[in-house]
Structure formats: C-alpha cells, structure tokens
Image: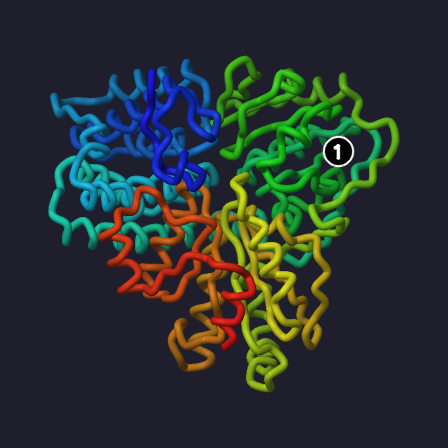
Amino acid sequence: MSMFCFQCEQTAQGKACQMAQGVCGKKADTANLQDELTSCLIELANCNEKNEDITKLLIDGLFVTITNVNFDNKSIQKFIDKVKAHIKCDFDFDIKTVWDCDEDIRSLKSLILFGLKGMAAYAHHAKVLGYKDETVDDFFYDALKAIANENQQDELVSLVLKTGEINLKCMELLDRANTETYGKPVPTKVTTNIEKGPFIVVTGHDLHDLALLLEQIKDKGINIYTHGEMLPCHAYPELKKYPHLKGNFGTAWQNQQKEFDNLPAPILFTTNCIMPVKESYKDRVFTTSVVDYPECVHIDENKDFTSVIEKSLELGGYKEDMEMSGINGGQVLTVGFGHDTVMSVADKVIDAVKSGAIKHIFLVGGCDGAKPGRNYYTEFVKQAPNDTLILTLACGKFRFNDLDLGEINGIPRLLDMGQCNDAYSAIKVALELSKAFNCSVNELPLSLVLSWYEQKAVCILLTLLYLGIENIRLGPSLPAFVSENILQFLVEKFKIKQIKTPQEDLKEILG
C-alpha cells in the first residue's frame, strides 16, 4: 500500500511521501484514512445546513488530519463513520481528484485546505473555552465547498487570501478566549530543572486540559512540567497560581523520542506534536482530545485524568533533583511577552528605535522539526547584532530560547510571545508599531524570519500575506505543494524569500 502526502515541510525529497510510511512516521493506511476523512468532511460541508454539531465535526475532523496528531486507524475510522452518518445528500468527492489535477489549481487548493486545517486547531481551542465567531465557522463551509467545486485560478487566489483574513479573526478569538479565561500573560522565568518525586509532563497546546489536570492533582503531591508548546502556560496568572506547576521538561518536540525514553513519569498529549511512540515509554503515554496513538490510553471528553495520576504515583519520578538545560545549556526560560506586555513598554521601544539604541527588530519563530538545516535559526539569533531585538513564538524558539542575550535600555533582547497560537500577538505589535511610527509594517525596521513545519504555520503565513507583509524569509525549505507558477506569483507580489545563511541574510537585511 502506498500514500500521497506533501502537507509538511519534511516531506520526502521535498516533493511528497508516496511510500509505505511517511517521513513523519505515519503509515500509508493511516494517511489514506485521513484522506478519506478529508473527503467526507468536504462532502459534509456541501450537503448540510450549518449547525453546531456539523461545525464541530468539520473543525475537529480537520484537526485530526494535521501532521503528528492522530496515528490510530481505529479512532480515525470511527470519526469517518460519525461524519458519514451526518451526510444528508448524494454529493461524492474524493480528495485524490485535487492531488491529481492541474498543478497550479492543486497548489491553490492545497494552500486553502492546509490553511483550513491550521485554523481548525485554533478554532477548536477557542470552542473548548466557549468562544466562537460565526464568520469563522461559516468560512469552514464556504472554503470546503470551494475546494470541491471551484477551478478558476483567480477565484482560488482570492480564497487563499480570504483564508488568511479569516484566520486573523480566528487567532484574535483564541487570544481573547485564553486571556479572558486565564488572564493576560506576564513575564515569568521558568526553570528547566526537575524536582524529585512524582510528576507529569504535559505537552501539546491546550490550556484547558492543563488547567483541569492542575486542579485534579492539587492535593496529591504531584508536580507538573510543561513540554514544547505548553511552555508559555507558565505566564498565565490563572495557571501559574498553582504551586505544583513547576517548570519545563525537555527541549524541542522532535527530540521527544530520546527525551521521553526511560522517563519516570507519564506524558499527556493534549494536541498535535506526537511522534511515533517507542515501546520503551508507550506505557507512559496518554492522549486526549483529537490526539490518539495505538495501544496508548486515551482520555475521553469527560477529562478524568485518574489513570495519568495513578501512573505518576506508580512511577514515582526521579529519586533526586535533576539539573537539566535547554539546547544551548541554559537553565532558565523567560516567557510571557504577549502583545499587552510588549505594548506596555512600547514607548521605550519607540524611543530606543528613534535614538538608535535599537537598530532592528527580528521576529524569529515558527515550527521546529528534525530536518537538517534548522540550526540556521540558532546561528541567526546568535549572530544578530547586540542592538537588535528578537521576538519569538511557537516551538521554533527552542533552538535558542535558553540563550542570555542581555537587554537594551531595560528591555530583554529576547521576547517570547508564546505558542504558535499566539502569532496574533506578534501581528498586533507590528500593526501598533506601524501606527506609532506613522508608516506601513513593511517600512518598519522589522524583519520576519520564519520556520515552518505543518499546517498551523501555513495559515499564519496566509494571514501575513493577507496583511500585505513583504520580504518574509521562510525555511528551511519552501512548501512542496506550492507549484512553480504560484511560487513565482508569491515572490513577485509579496517578495517571499527562502533563507540562505545567517550571514548572508543578516547582511542583506541590515544593509
């Protein structure tokens, strides 16, 4: 059995995974089931009137098909059966017709579909907290209908940018959901060291799951350590009030197979970023929400984490305190520089730029991954001059977030703005600075140097394009699903560039 998948950055030979197993570890039968689920979701959007149940199926179903979310055929088939039971007409569609069509049409439809998948993750998190936006919900129906029915290039180009526009609304919605529920993030120092005794590692992106677990274990003598994109949770007042939220375990998500090996604690996966689970720690992996992995315990929507708690007490944690560090040897990670925090010192930033104390601002962030070449981002940050600020977000920051870059006029040179979900913060800061300087974002001393891996990065890129932001540097490689003609269009209209070397790019940016 073979597969066809080119939705992530590490796809085979930079073209597509078309073998028995993808580079991400997803097997062909799983990939084909995810294609079937995608086809069913498009049929559902074309056949049904909008209602809450159908909207939830569309959003959660798209989330299931994001890279490194669900490797379990049984749970995917169960979701397919649930979707099919709701389809009310004879509209038939097979996503393979998109993979096989004209390459430019395929490219545009892929940008829309993969952008929708990323947006679905953000909409899912907002809905869990009781927040929704009718415009966002409506767009899932409209865009999925267009993927099946629209073949005019101009219309599809417009829909690509519309995807970016609606994703901006979705990210704003999620920002409001998180901050109104858990408070506005505040600068917080997080240790990488692990205390002795029972603990649980929580990874993924879902603040709600973390909050529920923190509440369920508050009297049980168990500590919680975040992992990967859960690191920014330490900055939210309603989460940091729990004294047993202790620190952050491990480094980037793609190192989990090594770092989870022989870990004396359970790991709870709340969303994507699960890699094929090794036998050495499979008994310690627990999944919830849309995440699922064969032979691992899945926590259902009731969110009873008793099995995770019991496993933590059984394993007992480390016998002594453990000193650990980030990739570069640092033991303190500072988080909590969301848009409210950064804008509270906007006058200092503006004065520093006007005085020449800050010569340039870089946004260096995005998805991390295992493919060679990603040390570029570490070297770029290390080589950035001392009179520059580094904004960062998403898991790409683990390449350099333990570095001590010092300060400029009391402002830390490295400002961690949060998860990939928090890209809205960076966009808001850029827009507010452009107002303060009375210029466009493209005229600011600001450069975006982004890494991408999966579909949430795609929808963020589409939002940046919708806003007309130019000269984005993207890497390590350009998307395989973007055809030569569509790439040329993006280069001509938005001046997108592929990263070169840190030295070359810094020289070109700083002149």
Q: Quadrant of residue 481?
A: top left
Residue that carries the numbered disc 1 in the rendered image: 223
Residue 411, how many percent across, how many down? 67, 71
Residue 159, how many percent across, how many down? 22, 50
Please tell me which residue is depicted at 45% across the width and 75% down the height of the picture.
444
How is the model colour-coded? rainbow
Please tell me which residue is depicted at 56% across the width and 40% down the height of the picture.
207
Q: Please, which residue is most extreme toward the right here?
A: 320
Q: Nearer the viewer, residue 511 or 390?
A: 511
Please tell me which residue is depicted at 65% across the width and 67% down the height of the picture.
413
Question: SS at mark 1?
Answer: strand
Residue 467, how many percent across, how many down? 34, 63
On the rendered image, what quadrant is the N terminus found in? Answer: top left
Q: Please, which residue is most extreme toward the bottom here?
A: 355
Q: Is residue 105 left or right of residue 308?
A: left
Q: Is residue 308 left or right of residue 451?
A: right
Residue type indicated by callout 1:
Asn
Above or below: residue 444 compared with residue 261: below
